[in-house]
Image (cartoon, rainbow, N blue to C red):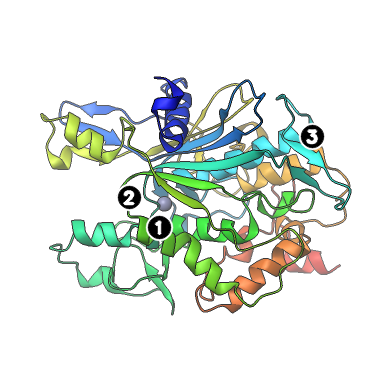
Amino acid sequence: MAAADTSLADQIAQCVIDSYRALPKRGKPTSKGPDKEEWTVLAGFVIEDTRPEASQRLTCVALGTGLKCLHSKQLRPFGDTVHDSHAEVVARRALVVYLMNQLHQPQTMPPVFGTHSDSAKHRLDSQLLLHLYTSQCPCGDASVDSLKTAEDEDEEPQLKRRRVNDGVIRGHQDFASLGTLRLKPGRADSIPTLSMSCSDKIARWNAVGVQGSLLAQLIDPIYLSSIVVGDLFNQQSIDRALNQRVARALADKRLPSGFRANQCTIEQATVVFERSQTAMKANNASVSEDGVVTADSSIYWFLGAASSVALVNGQRQGAKVRRDACQTKKLWPDICKLALFHKYRELFPQSQEVSTYRQEKDRAAEYQAVKACLAEAPEFGAWVRCPEECESFDTAGCVQTAAEDSR
Ligand SMILES: [Zn+2]
């Protein structure tokens, strides 16, 4: 199809879907039998090169799929597991790997980063724009209105109705509450997760950037130009969840140089991701409503990777999980906290004096200052942070006790 015939939003969506299709089957949703078909969410980051002379305008640089999230009792202290495997989160972690690689040894032309005389840090080239595509509206506040319409008749059991924490709602309940922090839903009868919804996490990227705290020490924050959403699209609720909350929370704050309350454009994609819930239900008349089930596995991929990687329960698919010890290095998913920490230290070895992942994150003073500004605002004050005992590992995945830290 000629580019001129298609909206930029659809081109961005198509760019991610094409990259997904080019990846091997392993970890992708599949047919589980004659009356069982898996669906998933696909998310991906696309860099748009706006230079007139650019040979390729849109490039998908990272993507992820998935709908699963570990509950609080499944979390591990070694950093070797991906706690939150929702597509947007997996894709964002893959983006961080891509950015680390680009910063260390640029593989693409033109280079993604430049340096500027007014800042010691690297900066994404100003003619490059970053877009996020997600095949379904991000879970949490952005999708509350659509789910409310879809499930108005659904009587929820009392079990689902408990709040975990003041100001935070557990998953799919209390749809009347808008602009509220929500934890990722697990099954109604399961132990709660400690992972904030994708709406909450993307909203926070609008304040601190998508690069994460480690890279924030080396580069200026990178913000989304737009988010392109497929199913359950509702402009108003997405804008409320991702933009307005952040604008309100940071309205009176003085932010460190380079940071802002970013407002991303919100666009709807009309191209269809073939393994979305809507497409699976529409295209499989022979499969009953209950036969279209959520995929157990996730995949992630970043530009420059040899291939995509499949994850199940936050570990590489097929890896035997050692219960009481860190996985061996070759089993670490590239996008887990431990692998990112290890890679960061390997690529940028100037930062040797702190020992744990949490300490390294805390060194990003400006990034943490923006997070603190958000935490002071009622919109984000009840944010549930990953427990410290899950971020007290060193670059080898050894858990450092408090006593050792204070020596
Ligand atoms: Zn999500």
- The Cα–Cα distance between marks 1 and 3, rounded to whole angstroms, is 35 Å
Q: Amino acid at mark 3?
A: His
- Front residue of 241/281: it is 241
- The Cα–Cα distance between marks 2 and 3, rounded to whole angstroms, is 38 Å
Q: Earlier in the sequence, mark 2 or mark 3?
A: 3
Residue positioned 41% across, 22% down in the render:
25
Disc 2 crowd rating (10 Å Cα; few below 14, some 14-19, many 20+) is: many
Q: Quadrant of the C terminus?
A: bottom right
Q: Earlier in the sequence, mark 1 or mark 3?
A: 3
Q: Above or below — where is 235 with respect to 36?
A: below
Q: Above or below — where is 128 with respect to 378?
A: above
Residue positioned 68% across, 43% down in the render:
340
Q: In this image, 294 relative to 156: left or right?
A: right
- The Cα–Cα distance between marks 1 and 2, rounded to whole angstroms, is 8 Å
Query: What residue did someone put label 2 on?
Result: 233
Query: Is the residue under label 2 in contact with that under label 1 (CB below 8 Å)?
Result: yes
**Numbered circle sitting on residue 104:** 3
Q: Looking at the picture, how far across and down is residue 175, in whole percent?
A: 28, 68
Q: Above or below — where is 209 with respect to 57?
A: below
Q: Amino acid at mark 2?
A: Phe
